[in-house]
Image: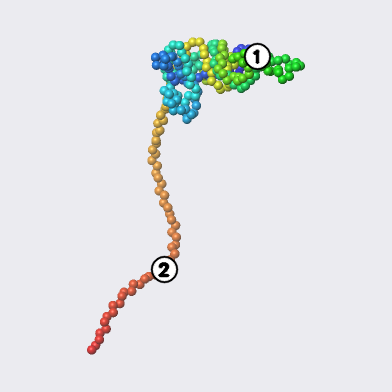
Amino acid sequence: MTQIWEGDKVVPVTPVAAGPCFVTQVKDEKTDGYFALQVGFDTKKEKNVKKPQKNHLAKSGHNNLKYVKELRLTAPIEASIGDVITTETFAKGDIIDVVGISKGKGFQGVVKRHGFSGHKHTHGNKDQERHSGSVGPKGPAHVFKGTRMGGQTGDEQVTTSNLEIIEIDTPNNIIYVKGSVPGAVNSLIIIKGQGDLKFSAAVAPVIEAEVKTEEVVAEATPEVIEIKSEEAAPAVEEAKVEEVAPIEEKPAEVKE
């Protein structure tokens, strides 16, 4: 919670991120048997969305919505898939009801859970100050249903009525509600108010195509000439192989 000054008075408020919410499905009595509006809020990593849900949400242009809720209606409504609900639906000074899941407090006794006053803190009441006492008569020999006893506390749906909207931050979609609302920090709540919902048409994201202009610059490529230093090659005496012609032996002349 935080506080807002109104003149010379300070007002305790709870900032609520209320949107944008996207319409994911519109149900009517002809096809579904009842009137309802399915909306989605907040986003999560696309890899954590299962394929059936991803294909269903893709019609609205947002396939990675974190929360999807269905709001029952009593009459048809003029809305289409992809429409956006923002804080423009509400106005400063509106009286609203907030529905949320209260904080879980675990197993608690009757004093904290039901507001029992407990026993006297005088002599003769050892370790009995916060006990529940008798839970039923001896005759039926069983505990009646609905008897107030210790047990799980919190973590249940709670509706807080007649809360006032003190201020609205439209650019950031934040509503400042007077007082506290049910639920823990960053929990999901539903705001109910009087009047009609205001829808704004979904704006398709504009993808600007970047035109890359390539400039061709003629550059003279310098010729790289490698100059190798001439090293004095060692003089290698090649043995010359003399070709010896075969000597033809002439037959000796014999004089008779």
Q: Residue furthest right?
A: 123
The foreground one among 60 and 174 is 60
Could you tell me which quadrant the N terminus lies in? top right
- x and y percent of residue 56 in the render? 43, 24
Q: Position of residue 152 (x, y in %)?
A: 60, 20
Q: Nearer the viewer, residue 124 or 247?
A: 124
Mark 1 vs mark 2: in front: 1
Q: Secondary structure at mark 1?
A: loop
Residue at 52% across / 20% down in the picture?
Answer: 172
Q: Is residue 21 visible?
A: no
Crowding around mark 1 (Cα neighbors within 10 Å: few <14, some 14 to 19, many 20+) is few
**For the point 43% across and 22% down, which residue is it?**
60
Residue on which disc 1 sits: 138
Towards the viewer: 218 or 248? 248
Residue closest to the eye, 65 or 169: 65
Left or right of residue 165, residue 117 in this image: right
Q: Amino acid at mark 2?
A: Glu
Query: In the rendering, which numbered label is found on residue 149?
Result: none
Indicate left or right for 220 with 253 as reference. right
Q: Position of residue 168 (x, y in %)?
A: 54, 16
Q: Amino acid at mark 1?
A: Lys
Residue 97's place in the image compared with 229, above or below, is above
Location of residue 219 (image quadrant): top left
Q: Residues within 10 Å of mark 2 (few under 14, many from 20)?
A: few
SS of the residue under disc 2: loop
The residue located at (56%, 16%) in the rendering is: 158
Q: Which residue is mark 2?
A: 237
| Residue that extends furthest to the left in the rendered view of this protein | 256
Residue at image position (57%, 14%) is: 160
Q: Marks 1 and 2, how far apart in space? A: 133 Å
